[in-house]
Image (cartoon, rainbow, N blue to C red):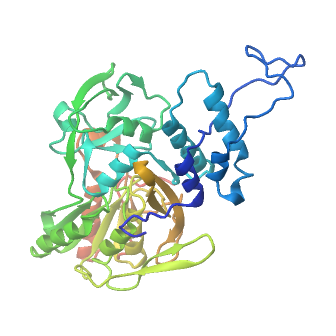
């Protein structure tokens, strides 16, 4: 996937954009009773003749698809002629149709990105977006705060790690997908969002009124820890990540560290090419990943000539929020014995998506085009990467601002530096599950 998002639009999408479509979804009804009358409705007398598909509608459909699309146009016309609430919002129908078409594929990573969703997602990969400024967990029952970003509106009002967002602008989020809830929280800078959160130790929901702001996030930060250990935190793989990493490594390597900790926790990924560029900072040569397509063909991506740190031992922190490009980096370093992974099983997103913008600023089609494999041809989709050193971090740890995973990473790296454990046999980790 190139950093320049491709703009190829398939023929079905072209049909949708040129003419509009009818939103798919569930229909809940009753079987027709023996009397032939539909309960609580005006029965349509038999024989029923569907609306006529117009010449313009047929002309807007490619000739080879005209028969296939007759029921669609009939449904479109029924809605416009018979639906009780008029006039019909054609844009809403068009977007709903795209959404329904993508959902039918049954791939959670393939979906329609409405304009606001697409714009926000693209902005975040550029290192800035409008919102409240907080890292969140999308795998819980509610949208859950992992940590507010320093200097953000979320930090200013007092949101804390572990807060579960139960109500957004008066709407109960119970049963709502956390990603959908997240989309309700983000919004234009200067606008207000009201949320109610459940916080451990509080018997009542806590209410917050937050004014959204423009959030600028450095994708890479770093510092020198005690014992001459360089700590590098990569939170996304976006437009600026490669340059920011290069600058951060320049500053840290000038201080002669003995080893490096790379923190990929809650890094959801980003551009594939950025993942290759970042991995190439630590791997001198060899394949970084394979991209395998549905027809069995594959492409390979090899290390680039921009290596900076090939001789220092590395520990990589991963967790359940480390996905996609994060797993490309961590998987390659693990396969080449360049790093020891510390934390918990990663997310397991071993597929590649293209975001293909649609015409007239109508969002984008996000489509899975391939699966990717690690250098040793491991498929991690829906599986994830297994850490070499398993360490959990609890909600109590978050609340107490403890980080046992980072502690374990430091201890693991010290053990490697002291020669007390080879890279393939790490010391007994903290919080190791009992078999």
Q: In the rendered image, which quarter is residue 173 located in?
A: top left
Residue 196 seen from this side = yes
Which residue is more in the foreground, 354 or 398? 354
Farthest-out residue, front: 55
Vertical relation: 292 (above or below) 120: below
Residue 10 is left or right of residue 390, and the answer is right
Instruction: Give x and y (percent) for residue 42.
Output: 75, 16
Q: Of all residues shown, which one is farthest toward the right?
A: 34
**Depth check, front residue: 37 or 154:** 37
Question: Which residue is the extreme one toward the left?
Answer: 255
Which of these two is toward me, 42 or 229?
A: 42
Which quadrant would residue 167 be assigned to in this image?
top left
Q: Residue at x 13, y 70 (%)?
A: 252
Image quarter of residue 188 = top left
Q: Is residue 145 left or right of residue 335?
A: left
Q: Residue at x 81, y 25 (%)?
A: 31
Give the quarter of the figure containing the N terminus: bottom left
Relative horizontal placement of residue 279, taking residue 105 as reference (left or right): left
Residue 421 shows up from this direction? no
Q: Position of residue 288 (x, y in %)?
A: 41, 77
On screen, 130 above or below 314? above
Q: Position of residue 51 (x, y in %)?
A: 73, 34
Residue 108 shown left or right of residue 335 in the figure:
right
Q: Who's the residue at 42% across and 70% down the image?
A: 331
How many numbered tags mark residues here?
A: 0
Residue 11: x and y in percent read 59, 59
What's the residue at 58%, 47% (across, down)?
A: 103
């Amino acid at each position: 996937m190139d950093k320049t998002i491709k703009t190829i639009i398939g023929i079905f999408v072209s049909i949708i954009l040129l003419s509009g479509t009818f939103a798919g979804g569930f229909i809940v009804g009753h079987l027709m009773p023996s009397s032939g009358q539909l309960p609580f409705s005006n029965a349509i007398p038999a024989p029923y003749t569907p609306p006529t598909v117009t010449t313009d509608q047929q002309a807007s459909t490619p000739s080879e698809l005209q028969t296939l699309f007759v029921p669609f146009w009939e449904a479109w016309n029924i809605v416009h002629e018979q639906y009780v609430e008029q006039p019909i919002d054609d844009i809403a129908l068009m977007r709903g149709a795209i959404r329904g078409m993508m959902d039918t594929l049954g791939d959670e990573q393939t979906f329609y990105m409405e304009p606001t969703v697409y714009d926000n997602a693209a902005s975040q990969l550029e290192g800035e977006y409008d919102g409240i400024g907080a890292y969140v967990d999308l795998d819980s029952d509610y949208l859950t705060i992992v940590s507010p970003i320093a200097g953000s509106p979320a930090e200013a009002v007092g949101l804390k790690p572990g807060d579960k967002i139960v109500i957004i602008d008066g709407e109960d989020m119970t049963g709502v997908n956390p990603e959908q809830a997240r989309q309700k929280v983000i919004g234009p800078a200067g606008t207000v969002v009201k949320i109610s959160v459940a916080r451990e130790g509080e018997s009542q929901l806590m209410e917050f009124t937050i004014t959204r702001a423009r959030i600028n996030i450095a994708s890479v930060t770093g510092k020198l820890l005690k014992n001459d250990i360089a700590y590098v935190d990569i939170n996304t793989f976006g437009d600026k990540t490669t340059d920011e990493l290069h600058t951060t490594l320049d500053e840290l390597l000038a201080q002669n560290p003995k080893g490096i900790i790379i923190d990929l926790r809650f890094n959801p990924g980003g551009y594939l090419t950025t993942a290759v560029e970042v991995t190439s900072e630590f791997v001198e040569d060899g394949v970084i990943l394979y991209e395998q397509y549905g027809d069995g063909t594959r492409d390979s991506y090899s290390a680039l000539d921009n290596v900076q740190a090939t001789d220092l031992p590395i520990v990589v922190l991963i967790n359940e929020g480390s996905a996609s490009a994060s797993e490309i980096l961590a998987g390659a370093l693990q396969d080449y014995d360049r790093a020891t992974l510390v934390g918990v099983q990663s997310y397991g997103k071993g597929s590649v998506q293209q975001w293909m913008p649609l015409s007239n600023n109508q969002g984008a089609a996000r489509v899975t085009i391939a699966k990717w494999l690690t250098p040793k041809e491991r498929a991690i989709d829906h599986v994830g990467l297994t850490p070499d050193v398993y360490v959990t971090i609890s909600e109590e740890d978050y609340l107490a601002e403890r980080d046992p995973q980072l502690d374990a990473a430091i201890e693991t790296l010290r053990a490697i530096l002291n020669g007390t454990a080879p890279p393939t046999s790490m010391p007994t980790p903290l919080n190791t599950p009992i078999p």
